[in-house]
Amino acid sequence: SAAGGDEGVPENVADLHALLHNAGVTPPYVLVGHSSGGFRVRQYQSRFPAEVVGMVLVDSAHEEQVWRFNDVLAGSVRGIPQDAAGLARLGMLPPRERLQSHTTIPLIVLEHGKPIPLPGPAAAHSELIEKMMHVLQQDLASRSTQGELRTVADSGHDIPAEDPEAITKAIRDVVTRTRHQ
């Protein structure tokens, strides 16, 4: 449940905030999020900007991805609610709504370099979906005046298992940049 004073903050972001503070882990933080964890990292930074000095997003989900993927290939997103309320619960934006967040902190976005195999009819459109994923990762990197996009060439979506050193290097680079500010 949300901690007191965190009304309007997604439950898991409020929980992380409470956990860090209750454990005595004091800011500033460099936060790292993989896949849907990228949402949470950005939400945390948006809600508690004074606590976050840098971020690493690892093949992060993007708030516009459901409607953008459906634009590329109608019906390509399955198992996720398509109504505005359902999308909002997941941190996704409804069709045509654009992500508005911007920051000035060091940010490195890591994207997969090997195409992600798509199931069923979507497989025939994998090149278009991959291009859209790249556009979304570029967009995330552009959200910071200190944003950088890196491609992890020999990795699919599971970068933490396939190339953890790429993540370690990105974290070190962000920490170094925060120290020079």
Image (cartoon, grey):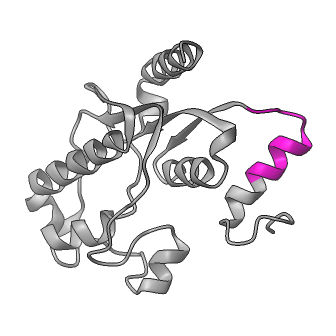
Q: Residue at x 76, y 50 (%)?
A: 17
Q: Is residue 28 above or below residue 15?
A: above
In the rendered image, residue 136, in percent from the top left (x then y), is placed at: 27, 51
Q: Between residues 125 and 21, which one lies in front from this camera angle?
A: 21
Q: Between residues 53 and 64, which one lies in front from this camera angle?
A: 53
Give the extent of the magenta segment. 16-27
Q: Residue at x 54, y 18 (%)?
A: 181
Q: Quadrant of residue 148?
A: top left
Q: Between residues 9 and 128, which one lies in front from this camera angle?
A: 9
On screen, residue 172 versus residue 144, left or right, reads: right
Q: Residue at x 15, y 59 (%)?
A: 123
1 falls in the magenta region: no
Q: Between residues 28 and 127, which one lies in front from this camera angle?
A: 28
On screen, residue 132 versus residue 84, left or right, reads: left
Q: Is residue 107 above or below residue 157?
A: above
Q: Is residue 115 above or below residue 3?
A: above
Q: Residue at x 83, y 33 (%)?
A: 25
20 falls in the magenta region: yes
In the rendered image, residue 71, in percent from the top left (x then y), is placed at: 16, 72
On screen, residue 108 versus residue 28, left or right, reads: left
Q: Quadrant of the N terminus?
A: bottom right
In the rendered image, residue 66, in percent from the top left (x then y), is placed at: 32, 69
